Amino acid sequence: MTVLLWLSLFIVFYTFVGYGILLYFIIKIKRLVKGKAVLPLVVDAELPSCTLVVAAYNEEFYMEQKIKNSLQLQYPAGKLKFVFVTDGSSDRTPEIISGYPQIQLLHKPERAGKIAAVHRAMEYVDTEVVVFTDANTFLNAEAITRICRHYADKTVGSVAGEKRVHIDKSADASAAGEGFYWKYESTLKKWDSELYSVVGAAGELFSVRRNLYQNVPSDTVLDDFMISMLITEQGYRIVYEPNAYALETASENVSEELKRKIRIAAGGMQSVLRLKSLLFSTKYPLLSFQYVSHRVLRWTVTPFFLLLAFLLNLVMVINGTTWFYQLLFAGQVVFYCLALLGYMMEKRQIRIKALFIPYYFCIMNYAVLAGIIRYFTKKQSSIWEKAQRKI
């Protein structure tokens, strides 16, 4: 029982903190041996041709601003195209886009989901690189240039931009927790990229070489993750570009954030099962190490070990154990009480930032458990109701 308890605690610690610590020291050693990698300068004439693809469903509130943001992106004249697909939209989204001749609009009344829309858009992409971004996110002016300069390296097959979450002073636990989570994720991605490859890109902003793009199955939940990871299966790297970023607002509230997290967890389980070749790859062992450490553990077993650690520690305390394990159990109880208190304060709209992290941590792990159940009960559709964002 003691061994199983420590194994459970180790896996939980490694998943959320230990891997980051290990990465930090590996990168430090790598820099001492090889020096810090410096990206070579790429002149405008050497930048690849590029298409910006936006799949939008009923985004009339954001669309005018999204278009203006897209048209202000800095890139060599004649090398950047725009394809917006609005299949199934029943609001003014297609009408707004149609007022801009610089943008190629694809629209049909039937809604088949985001990935079907992306597949249709890709039929019209004839450039060397394609950049995907969401309709409700806004890019910094240099984003495309920052991304596309990496393609001078022939080993790079995909480039992931950074997701930034706008947090105001009155942020609730979902907003503050989401912001903290993405800052930590961004740090891990920087180190993953420097070690070898990022393990999957987020749909807010990422790109791929057009000739490496593969259609994913129509029922794919995390299409952005799968599209980018299929690139690594071909032997290419995903690099991270933190100076190309997509800014979006946080989820409207905890309920909306939980809905989004459960969907991601269901998609994560689906992705793990479909990318079995990367779990213990002898061809790409370093990528497997990164993939299992950064993604697979948190999407599969870690939430169960979190529960197991609590239950085993409880049994040990009930049966009589040393003061150390009693203290360990007390620590777990305090942590979960802080998360519960965070929940209660959130319901009353009382903001206590010290409670955001334990509350958000528990929400994340609950979402994984719920997402796994949803996936195996086949209740997760690839056509999903988007989470509402703060305005």
Image (spheres, rainbow, N blue to C red):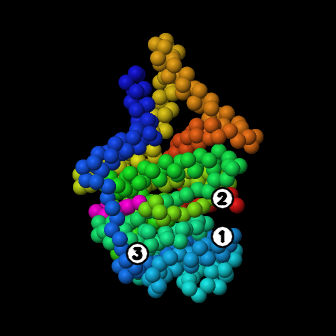
Residues packed near mark 3 inside 10 Å, few (<14), some (14 to 19) or many (20 plus): many
**Compared with residue 51, is residue 186 higher up or lower down, i.e. above or below?**
above
Q: Which of the 4 image quarters holds residue 246?
A: bottom right
Instruction: Please tell me which of labels 3 and 1 falls first in the chain.
Output: 1
Instruction: Please tell me which of labels 2 and 3 falls first in the chain.
Output: 3
> Is residue 201 in view from this perspective?
yes
Give, as a single range, the part of the protein colored magenta. 233-240
User: How far across and down, in percent of the image, does residue 308 sit?
Assistant: 47, 30
Asked whether, in this view, residue 339 is left or right of residue 222, the answer is: right
Name the foreground residue: 11 vs 379.
11
User: How far across and down, in percent of the image, does residue 355 sit?
Assistant: 63, 37
Task: Please state which amino acid type lies under the numbered disc 3.
Answer: Val
Element under disc 2: loop
Task: Please state which amino acid type lies under the numbered disc 2.
Answer: Arg
Residues packed near mark 2 inside 10 Å, few (<14), some (14 to 19) or many (20 plus): some
User: How far across and down, in percent of the image, does residue 164 sit?
Assistant: 55, 58
Element under disc 3: strand
**Compared with residue 364, is residue 332 higher up or lower down, i.e. above or below?**
above
Task: Please state which amino acid type lies under the numbered disc 1.
Answer: Tyr
State how far apart marks 1 and 2 are (Cα): 11 Å
**Compared with residue 65, is residue 5 higher up or lower down, i.e. above or below?**
above
Q: Which residue is mark 1?
A: 62
Which residue occupies 69% across, 70% down?
61
Residues packed near mark 1 inside 10 Å, few (<14), some (14 to 19) or many (20 plus): some
Asked whether, in this view, residue 231 is left or right of residue 367, the answer is: left
Q: Which residue is mark 2?
A: 389
Q: Which residue is mark 3?
A: 129
Q: Is residue 179 magenta?
A: no
**Compared with residue 264, is residue 293 higher up or lower down, i.e. above or below?**
above
